[in-house]
Image (cartoon, coloured by chain):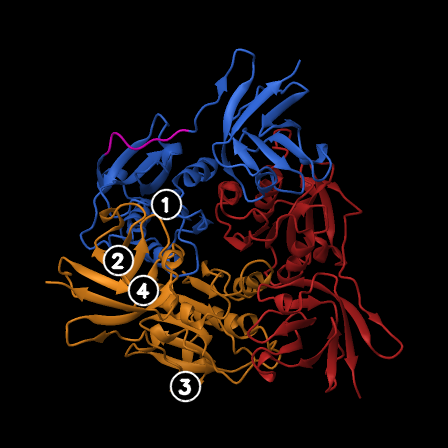
Chain colours: A red, B orange, C blue
Amino acid sequence: MTPPITLLTDFGTADGYVGEVKGVLSTLAPHAPLVDISHDLYAQDVEGARLAVARYWRRFPPGTVHLVIVDPGVGTARAALAVASEGRYLVGPDNGVLSPSLFALDARVVRLAEPPAAAPTFHGRDVFAPVAAQLAMGGPLEALGEPHPEPVRRRTPPPVRHGDGTLEGEVLTFDRFGNAVTNLVPARPTPPGTTVVTMGQEIPLVRTYGDVPPGAPLALVGSSGLVEIAVRNGSAASRFGMARGQRVVLTARP
Amino acid sequence: MTPPITLLTDFGTADGYVGEVKGVLSTLAPHAPLVDISHDLYAQDVEGARLAVARYWRRFPPGTVHLVIVDPGVGTARAALAVASEGRYLVGPDNGVLSPSLFALDARVVRLAEPPAAAPTFHGRDVFAPVAAQLAMGGPLEALGEPHPEPVRRRTPPPVRHGDGTLEGEVLTFDRFGNAVTNLVPARPTPPGTTVVTMGQEIPLVRTYGDVPPGAPLALVGSSGLVEIAVRNGSAASRFGMARGQRVVLTARP
Amino acid sequence: MTPPITLLTDFGTADGYVGEVKGVLSTLAPHAPLVDISHDLYAQDVEGARLAVARYWRRFPPGTVHLVIVDPGVGTARAALAVASEGRYLVGPDNGVLSPSLFALDARVVRLAEPPAAAPTFHGRDVFAPVAAQLAMGGPLEALGEPHPEPVRRRTPPPVRHGDGTLEGEVLTFDRFGNAVTNLVPARPTPPGTTVVTMGQEIPLVRTYGDVPPGAPLALVGSSGLVEIAVRNGSAASRFGMARGQRVVLTARP
């Protein structure tokens, strides 16, 4: 069985660009199931793409090829990469979007050769898709280019632990419900009475949405283990007017 | 052949949540085609999800597994369900979204056990997706949990027939063209001169858009057999400022 | 192997319409991979659909069936078509959306019979999807209907070459980054100093985004060979307030 090829892009779907990429994949890897992750990332949001890749890349079975095309530097000198890591493959630009796979001990990275006929504005179709198809068909990584020892690797910034036991972090991004995802990782189990302070609000850390009344703010440990700030049946982003980088402080009261 | 697994969620696609669910499915049911219905339902719109499920669940072949994750009560005491009905399977929360399948005579419903490690905010990934994969792989429904005899069942409210022959109903929802879908089911064939009155407008019931000039309002029997109110080449929702629950009256004039 | 069926519609995905179409396809062509191109075209945007189809239809392997449902005339006298062209099949309304396939020398076109029970507002489900499934299963085109010798064929308007060597064209459409796609096809290689004049701006034609500073306007030859007007890390559509049909002039300065 040919393994799946997943697609994460910021192309949107109001024109035929995603179709062009899928056509190339269908032609070169006809048996590979094509799995859409999203084409609706904010345009050129490299950090949003990195955080999304972190969520899903290891959930797919070994052999899966993850195509990640969020590429504001297309056509410039930035490298085009293919990565093998923990049995999965990732293909995309060297701008940090592939970072979650690059910290594994067994990660191998090659810099892709750029075909002379590649359109300088559409490496997704002309550089990345053909390589993803080759990997899905079982082609070896090393045949695709030279080793690339220093890929761009971005990390979620770690929170700072203060002497008084508080943990200071920041808002990384927002999900579509308006929940603010932070970089705070609390001790488990979290002591009762733990709160998150941000923008002058003191917000209780609870287990689930049902623990506060509708319309009330809450903090909880999200499905990635990170603290999220939410409003039950509402949006924390619009209620508090928070932005990425907003300071948040976790306090466990005795 | 492994039957398809369909996905209907309100997750949006601007982060990696849908990808996580698809990764679990690809790992546990590697041969099942994954078919996106939508991830763009209005957040937490249980009623919209129910109406969408009613449209498509029986159009897919027997064996299909429909995953429906619109779940404002995630992490609370609401049950997680798997249903077998008319040869198809449905998996989702016990809040009414699965209702269209629950009125069949042969419907069987079980309450899913919640794995201890399930993230309280992401049952889609940790509870529903693994069960959908098991069903697609041929696992029996009864192995998944205890029978659940009283699932939440919501119905489209029936219209009221008045003594003067008029039929009084309401707007259920809007489609993306701004058409208002009502709960009115007219007699077939509809007598000429039939109109729908709403918001002070008397709108002719016609067969198709081409029966009125561009820009004119019209009512027609939609593809589900329900009366819809539309504006040719326009939006009834924005023209008339209608909302869900708006009263509509069907009148057959002699 | 059953070839893929691709789907391009303007249905949006907030209700179950796309699901209904996919259910019909899954039932009648159970082994055909379903490949989403987009369901988010602007409602009833026939011209946008035509330009999208031009991008992708030939990128897919022979045998592929392209379903294109952007159909403001549904239920009127407009014909429903199936096309065989360069080894691919296309199914959709006779309003120009299938044009890119209709200029091939080997193009064959039939007018589909309309099943009596077809909902007059949903030919996507009741007319086009069953035919797409039949073609994917290997059914012959000629069995589907009578030859249709004069389908609607739309062409991108050609630019006008003036005596002074300038090339005058127009904006065809915008992509999701706000880039304006024009009908200008420059000589290759383009002489240095070539510019595009529009809305009182003189914009340099460069090779890639990196050739101008962030925030600066640029013109470049897009991945289809057409000149596009863009703003680096910005939107030409919102910066210049351009609309479809806006006049653009390409000038090669000596």
**Three-letter code, disc 4:** Met
Q: Is A66 above or below relative to C248?
A: below
Disc 2 packing (10 Å; few <14; some 14–19; many ≥20): many
Q: CA distance from mark 4 to mark 3?
A: 46 Å
- Rendered location of residue B23, percent (x, y): 56, 62
Q: Residue beneath label 4, please?
A: B199
Q: Quadrant of the C terminus of chain C?
A: top right
What residue sits right under mark 1 in the picture? C70
Give the Cα distance between marks 2 and 1.
21 Å
**Residue found at the far left of this picture:** B254
Residue A250 in the image: state x and y as whole percent: 77, 76
Amino acid type at image mark 1: Val
Give the labeled residue for mark 3.
B147
Nearer-N-terminus badge (4/3): 3
Task: Determine which of the numbered discs, if any, sits on residue B219 in the image.
Answer: 2
Marks 3/1: CA–CA distance:
45 Å
In the rendered view, would you say B220 is above or below B250? Answer: above
The answer to whether residue B215 is left or right of residue C45 is left
Element type at mark 3: strand
**What chain does mark 3 sit on?**
B
